[in-house]
Image (cartoon, grey):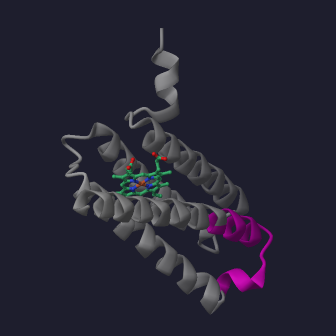
Amino acid sequence: MAGRVDAMDYATIKLIHQTAVALSVTGFFVRGAASLVDAPWVLGRLAKTVPHLVDSVLLLSGLTLAWTLRLTPDRAPWLLAKLAGLVVYVGLGVLALRPGRPRAVRAAAWLGALAVVGWMVSVAITKHPLGIFSLLAMR
Ligand code: HEM
């Protein structure tokens, strides 16, 4: 019985994680596009606070999943790859949304961040540090 409850809790947390991923990426896509056309709402309070809430849920649920599975980055190279991707995604994301930079730089950073987060999703699904690129190594 306890095992069944644990399994259900795990499935719930995983669903929360996946939902937070979808919200976070969709939100970043929309804010990035809006910022490129200088939409004023991107600098508003709501557009600045909601992403922090969503990203906290994303991070916390991810940490909980890793904790539950007893995964550490040294024992699960795909998790290490995903965390490295997270650093790059956040860095490019900040660059993309920061006003004052040339539009071409922001656009390139926005596209780069979207590519990186797409690759991160493929790493999570394949559980391989190369993610989608691991398919290239298939014989
Ligand atoms: C932008 C950041 C992140 C993205 C895009 C992302 C994406 C995903 C996705 C799509 C899955 C589901 C994979 C599947 O269907 O099997 C997943 C699972 C998982 N994520 Fe994340 N994640 C992120 C951040 C994190 C962080 C920060 C951690 C932990 C420190 C984490 C730990 C995990 C674990 C352990 C699983 C495995 C769940 C399972 O297969 O049962 N994630 N992630």
The correct choice, above or below, for 50 with respect to 37 in the image is below
Q: Is residue 2 left or right of residue 62?
A: left
The residue lying at 65 percent from left, 60 percent from top is 106
Q: Tell whether position 37 is magenta.
A: yes
Magenta segment, principal secondary structure?
helix
Q: Residue furthest front?
A: 1
What range of the chain is rendered magenta? Answer: 27-43
The correct choice, above or below, for 54 with respect to 68 in the image is below
Is residue 63 something one can see in this rendering?
A: no
Q: Quadrant of the N terminus?
A: bottom left
Q: Nearer the viewer, residue 43 or 82?
A: 82
The residue lying at 47 percent from left, 41 percent from top is 125
Q: Number of marks in the image?
A: 0
Q: Nearer the viewer, residue 45 or 102?
A: 45
Residue 41, position as x, y percentages in the image: 73, 85
Q: Nearer the viewer, residue 93 or 98?
A: 93
Is residue 103 something one can see in this rendering?
A: yes
Residue 134, position as x, y percentages in the image: 46, 25
The residue lying at 42 percent from left, 49 percent from top is 85
Q: Is residue 60 left or right of residue 122?
A: left
Q: Tell whether position 4 is magenta.
A: no
Q: Is residue 45 left or right of residue 11?
A: right
Residue 121, position as x, y percentages in the image: 51, 47
Q: Residue furthest top?
A: 139
Q: Nearer the viewer, residue 118 or 31?
A: 118
The residue lying at 56 percent from left, 66 percent from top is 24
Residue 99, position as x, y percentages in the image: 64, 75
Q: Residue furthest bottom?
A: 45
The correct choice, above or below, for 121 with respect to 10 in the image is above
